[in-house]
Amino acid sequence: MIELKNIYKTYNLGQPNAVVALNDVSLKIEEGEFIAIIGKSGAGKSTLMHILACVEDYEKGEYLFDDQPVSKLSESKKAKLRNKSIGTVFQDYSLIETFSAGENTELPLMFTRCSKKERKQRAENALREVGISKLYDQNALKLSGGQRQRAAIARAMIIKPRIILADEPTGALDSETSKQIMQLLTRINKTGAAVVIITHEKEISDYCNRKIVISDGRIVSDTLNEK
Amino acid sequence: MRLFKLAFGLIYRHMLLHAALIIQMTAVFLILANIVSTICLNLYSGNMMKNIFTQDFYRLEVLTERFLRVSTGGMTDISEIEAFDPEKVRGELKGDPVFCNEYVYPAFFADGRCLDLIFQDERLIKNTNFLLRGTANIEASEKEEGVIRIITAGGNYKTGDSLRGYIEVEDKTVECEFKVAGTLKKPYSYLSATNSAVSLSASVIAEELMPGQAIAFLDDMPDVTLKSANDYSGFCIYHVFFDDSLTSKEKAGNLATLQKYGSVTSAKEIEENTKKEISIWLEKKLPSLIFAAVIAVSGLSAVSLINISGNMNTFSLYCLSGCTKKRLYAIILVYILFIVSVSFIPAIGVLLISGFFRRLAAAFVFINHYTFITLGITALTLILIPVLFSLFAFRRKPLRAMILDYKKQ
Ligand SMILES: Nc1ncnc2c1ncn2[C@@H]1O[C@H](COP(=O)(O)OP(=O)(O)OP(=O)(O)O)[C@@H](O)[C@H]1O
Ligand SMILES: [Mg+2]
């Protein structure tokens, strides 16, 4: 589904404070995989995630989505890719505070032709799947950390994406809630979506089928998890 | 609707800020409307008198006994003031002058409608540059025996309409036929003999004709009705045109005669006062007009820019959810459009209400299409400039930067 070929990414390229974030990264992600990306702080994990989410560019290499080079896609085609195929969840919950949990969940559908009724229906279903169906009308500010993260996951899955990218989805949660979130992601993965998560914690990476370790912008190991 | 919801996400967060902004912009719209309309009124009134300015026209404000008694509390020795008799004064003037006040009598039509007719001299009417509907030509209209020509305001009468009815003068009624010689367009202005000021200008003389009033040709009036029509409570104002065939010496004599009875202002003086008034308005009000516009534009730009950078997370989430940049611009546009129209609506409301209560309108604002055009242009500027600013703010931000900005928060 996704193939990265020899990607190089340098921040502040050509300036004295240039930082090499990714150095010759090649990677293949197939449908339905469950991958953990592990590495020290500053290793380039988030950079890799942003490139996968088509929000970051890179100076060298190629990113193929379904064998299509992403660099050749127009801005609106990329937006469409994010809208239809890629769901994203970030560490900081990333909900819009003025919207309710339900409205946050509906957000990707706001940029499609989906009718209001259908949007609501699908948001309710998604919230039910993440276990907070009662909180549809609750304002995002009034949700607990775990509930917010669930809402964010509901938003990522409402479009039935082929891949969900999660940057430290459990980073700010206690271990019990982290466990629940991981179980949720595992369940979503079972329904067919590939899931890629970034994490620092070993217990979290143990949920995944494949572990990729990044260090100083390079992939230093890529192993399958034997369970 | 969807765009509106997404845009409203921006307003909701800073309700009070936006309420204050909306009040500010409403005030700016009203200031603009007031300034523009006053300048328009002055220009328009001046234009209405443009033919008269070229003639030997004078406005005589007679000091009547009654006026002096009222205004001085009876302190003046009124026996020293010559009693004012218009026929006598007219007789003292050389040549064949127009020496005319205005007379108001109600007219009742057979179909049940009625109008207060303001009778004016033909020369004054034909030299007034009325703003007329359609192609009516007052200057060319000729007297028909037994028909009173009238000029109406508003839409209830059409040029060429013939009406039967009667005029009531004191206890007498006189049967007449009326013919609509023209109907006025807004602002229904005419030159009246009721207003005065220390410095007489066209805008002082111009008055708004109410829909229940009409101008009528005095020359068409059946004789009998006019005889006892001289009752004045305050100023008694006469419009005077000297006979064109007089020598300048005779004219000077006439002027001296008029000055015996009150204060006289010539067309030339009125014209100069009018020009002065317009230039004072432009000089004094144009800067505040420009400042008001600048305040509004910069205020709205600042608030929308602050709001945009403060809401980067919202925008980045929109983008991550599949919103294109174009959509993002559309959302900003709707947001600014919303603020501007919400402040525009009360302003228009105030204008329409004050237009409805005409007396208030006269004191506050004179609405015409220029007022609305100016408001429209201002509204457009108010929308365009902040939108351009915002586009600029966005253009320099790649999507990743927006997301990173947000994560830093
Ligand atoms: N916008 C940026 N400008 C300059 N340097 C950047 C920028 N973003 C990241 N970097 C640098 O690139 C390197 C990789 O950053 P990245 O965010 O990918 O690390 P990470 O592995 O996600 O770290 P963490 O675990 O702390 O999130 C770091 O050295 C970082 O300082
Ligand atoms: Mg990171």
Image (spheres, coloured by chain):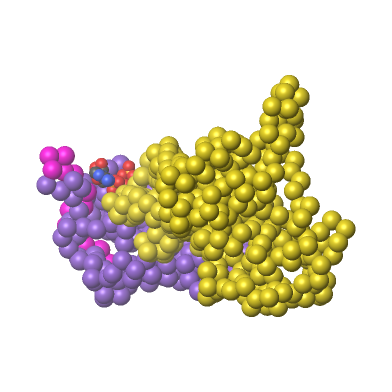
Chain colours: A purple, B yellow
Rendered-image quadrant of the N terminus of chain A: bottom left
Query: In this rendering, would A205 be left or right of B81?
Result: left
The residue at the point 43 percent across, 44 percent down is B249
Q: Does the stretch in magenta take in B358? A: no
Query: In this rendering, would A44 be left or right of A85?
Result: left
| Residue B138 image point, x, y percent | 55, 69
Q: Is residue B344 above or below residue B16?
A: below
The residue at the point 56 percent across, 47 percent down is B93
Q: Is residue B4 above or below residue B267?
A: below
Q: Is residue B181 above or below residue B35?
A: below
Q: Does the stretch in magenta take in A18? A: yes
| Residue B66 image point, x, y percent | 75, 35
For the record, the magenta segment spans A15-28
Q: Is residue A77 above or below residue A20?
A: below
- Of residues B394 and B163, the one drawn nearer to the viewer in this rendering: B163
Residue B325 occupies quadrant: bottom left
| Residue B71 image point, x, y percent | 71, 29
The residue at the point 61 percent across, 59 percent down is B121
How many numbered markers are drawn?
0
Query: In this rendering, would B325 be left or right of B175?
Result: left
The residue at the point 82 percent across, 62 percent down is B168
Rendered-image quadrant of the C terminus of chain A: bottom left
Magenta region, main secondary structure = strand
| Residue A127 image point, x, y percent | 60, 61
- Of residues B206 and B358, the one drawn nearer to the viewer in this rendering: B206
Specify whether residue B150 is in view. Answer: yes
Specify whether residue B299 is in view. Answer: no
